[in-house]
Amino acid sequence: MTRKGKGKGKRKGKKRNQAIEKRPRWLELPEVIWVDILQRLGAVGMMLTAEKVCTTWRRLCKDPSMWRVINMNNCCDTYLVSYFKAQEMCRRAVDRSQGELVDINMEYFAADELLAYVAERSGKLKRLGIACCYDMVHKDLVEAVQKFPLLEELSLTHTTITTKGIEAIRRSCPRLKSFDVNNNSCFMCLVWYSDY
C-alpha cells in the first residue's frame, strides 16, 4: 500500500470522529417545539413512527400530557391501519393518557366496546367526536356518553343514533354546550348552548 493511500484513510477516520462528536443543531431545539411537532403527527403517527426515531421522541411520546387530545380521524386511510389495529391503538393511546384525556376523535373504527373502554378511563373528557361508525348500537352509545360528566362538545357523524338517543344524551349531559349530529346524508345539526 502506498503512503498516499494511508493518508486518505486517516483523513476519513478523522472526519468520522468529528461527525460523531458534533450533534446536529436540530437536536438542540427546545422541548416545546418537539411537543408541537409530535402532536401534529397525531396519535397514530406518534405510535407508528415518531416514538421509534430517538430516545428523546420516545420519552416525549410516553408522556401522558401528549395524550390529552387523541385525534384518530382518517387513520385507516392515511396509515393503512386495519379496523382492529385502529381500535387497539386507540386503547393504547387512552391508556397513555392516564386519565387525563379531554378530547378524542374516532373515525371508522369506534365500536360499543371501545367507547365503553374510553368511558371507564376518561372521566375528564370534555369533547367527543365519532364519525362513520355504524357498528355502534345507539343504546350503548347513549350509555357511554352518559359516563362523561364533564362533556361539553359532542359530534356524531354517520352513526346509528336515533331521535330518542339524541334526547337522552341531551337530558343526561348538563354541561353540553354543542351537540352536532349528521346522519346518512341527511344533515341535521343540533346545537345547544348552555347559559354559562
Image (tube, rainbow, N blue to C red):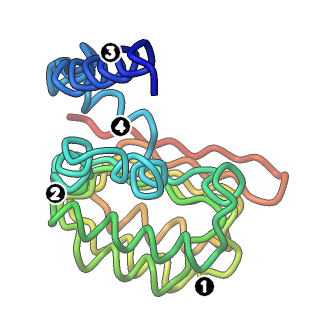
At x 61% / y 70%, what residue is drawn?
A: 109
The residue that disc 1 covers is 137
Question: Position of 94 compared to 162: left or right?
Answer: left
Q: Secondary structure at mark 2?
A: loop
Whether tag 4 and tag 1 are in contact, CB under 8 A, the answer is no
Q: Which comes before the other along the chain, label 3 or label 4?
A: 3
The circle drawn on residue 39 is 4
Is 57 placed above or below 150 here? above
At x 33% / y 51%, what residue is drawn?
A: 51
User: Which residue type does callout 1 highlight?
Assistant: Val
User: Which residue type does callout 4 highlight?
Assistant: Gln
Whether tag 4 and tag 2 are in contact, CB under 8 A, the answer is no
Residue 55: image x %, image y %?
A: 21, 48
Q: Secondary structure at mark 3?
A: helix
Among the 4 quarters of the image, the one containing residue 56: top left
Residue 72: image x %, image y %?
A: 51, 54
The circle drawn on residue 11 is 3
Is 10 placed above or below 116 here? above
* Nearer to me, 53 or 24: 24
Q: Given this view, does label 4 or label 1 mark the residue nearer the observer?
A: 4
